[in-house]
Image: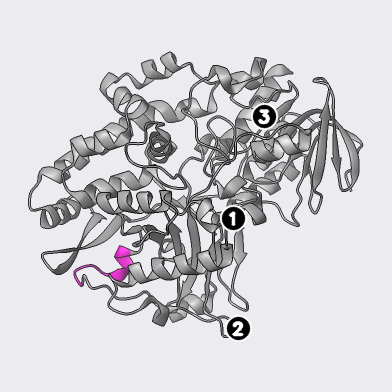
Amino acid sequence: MPERTSYDAVIVGGGHNGLVAAAYLARAGRSVLVLERLDHTGGAAVSTRAFTGIDARLSRYSYLVSLLPQAIVRDLGLRFAVRKRTVSSYTPAVRGGRPTGLLVGGGEARTRESFAELTGSEREFAAWQRFYGTTRRLAERVFPTLTEPLPTRAALRAAVDDDATWHALFERPLGELVEETFTDDLVRGVVLTDALIGTFAAAHDPSLRQNRCFLYHVIGGGTGDWDVPLGGMGALTDALAEAARGAGAEIVTDCAVTGIATDGRNAEVTCARGTIGARRVLVNASPRELAHLLGETPPPPAEGAQLKVNMLLTRLPRLHDTRVDPREAFSGTFHVAEGYGQLERSYRQAASGELPAAPPSEIYCHSLTDPSILGADLVRQGYQTLTLFGLHAPARLFAADNDATRERLLAATLAELDTHLAEPLADCLAHDADGRPCIEAKSPLDLDAELGLPGGNIFHRELAFPYADPEDGGGGAPARWGVATGHPNVLLCGAGAVRGGGVSGIPGHNAAMAVLEEG
């Protein structure tokens, strides 16, 4: 039970952003209550023993860290760390009837050689170096602004200080830049994938939703690196919960919030434990859920577009491309069916209501970078985890029969992976204590049902460019920090805030800063 009947701040939702906000506000001396409907905190950033009788703690939903500012880790004194992957990516291919692939990692010389072997010249590697040199400079300029008050569009453009880059990434469809920069279809596809994580779009989508997704995927940490959380994603949220409690915040689980009432100055939050008063309410849930709690008209429907698969293997499968060790190929991002043309075909098939014939996916083996997520016996026996993230799988495809469609797409996705393996993946799957294969798949509709992600959208709604938008609503400090709602004392501190999305803690930080700025 909550210890009080009224608080300076009540936070609805105990995901990582809500915990960040709670920790900052409690450290500033505010009375804080976090209410979480599930029996645990963490939201989508959790570690789970997903398979019966198996000592493997998987990052069940979110799985890599890029956008979490080190300033948050330092400010809150978190006992949390990430580890860099030695390989950025490997993409298998068939050229001239023989298996080959593109390895990015293992040092500049090895990457250069891999590009030359695949493409037949030095041109694509040189273009790659120039392209990612540009995105790194962009990251250095944009990432620090994410934990500051929202800049205007003009101010952010001035900070970028590169009109060509601004025009290419903020004003033109990303496909134009990709096609101008690279000539090889596979290289183009590897670049484009960062624009399609959880985002259903074509390379030339005039809405630029693909550009916004790409931007957030290349600016993280000021470098664009995507790192493995040591101990799994749950290690972060456990550390955040510990920091919030240590600062004096109360966290109550198994306590669903059913309504929020506010007159703009004071609010009441109705939950399973009764009605609790608050000066401010911070909502670590989607804009759809916020509207529901306020009794207002919900925003336009959001839609997720991914298949998430977790697996445990007794060993990594051998590859047709024998020049690459599987331990190296799977240690980074293993791209399947993600050539530029393949991605476009898959998008068009899904947009027409069909499952992609060759489903694109990205695969990661986190246990190669962080064996601590496996029990000691599993490590000794050579077990490994695999996380698969499928693209172009919009929620609309699952509406008629979620279970059957999920299984069809899973089978097609694994069959596509098998075309690059020298042995079927099924032969490498571990089995749980009940004899079942250690594999689980989540469709967008599953994520909606389990986590409240609207339409399974991992960003809660379409991502926004990280500058002020007059349509963001509200005023004062909440609007300055990109966390405003239609009510002055109700703030959005989840992924649906401006500069939300990903495991970052940024919306939680910014909501807390808005509260503290207003006093």
Q: Is residue 36 above or below residue 60?
A: above
The disc placed on residue 194 is none
Q: Position of residue 99 (x, y in %)?
A: 18, 68
**What residue is drawn where x is 41% and y is 50%?**
352
Tell me which amino acid carries mark 1: Leu
Q: Which residue is mark 3?
A: 512
Q: Which residue is mark 2?
A: 433
User: Is residue 325 shown in magenta?
Assistant: yes
Cα separation between marks 2 and 1: 28 Å
Q: Position of residue 350 (x, y in %)?
A: 41, 53
Answer with left or right where residue 313 lies relative to residue 80: left
Tell me which amino acid carries mark 3: Ala
Q: Is residue 22 visible?
A: no
**Tags 2 and 1 touching, CB below 8 Å:** no
Q: From which residue to which does the magenta span run? A: 322-329
**What residue is drawn where x is 31% and y is 35%?**
174
* Disc number lying in front (1 or 3): 1
User: Is residue 414 shown in magenta?
Assistant: no
Q: Residues within 10 Å of mark 2 (few under 14, many from 20)?
A: few
Cα separation between marks 1 and 3: 31 Å
Regarding mark 1 in the picture, which secondary structure is present there? helix
Answer with left or right where residue 372 lies relative to residue 512: left
Q: Which residue is mark 1?
A: 445
Q: Which badge, 2 or 3, comes first in the chain's sequence?
A: 2
Tell me which amino acid carries mark 2: Ala
Q: Residues within 10 Å of mark 1 (few under 14, many from 20)?
A: many
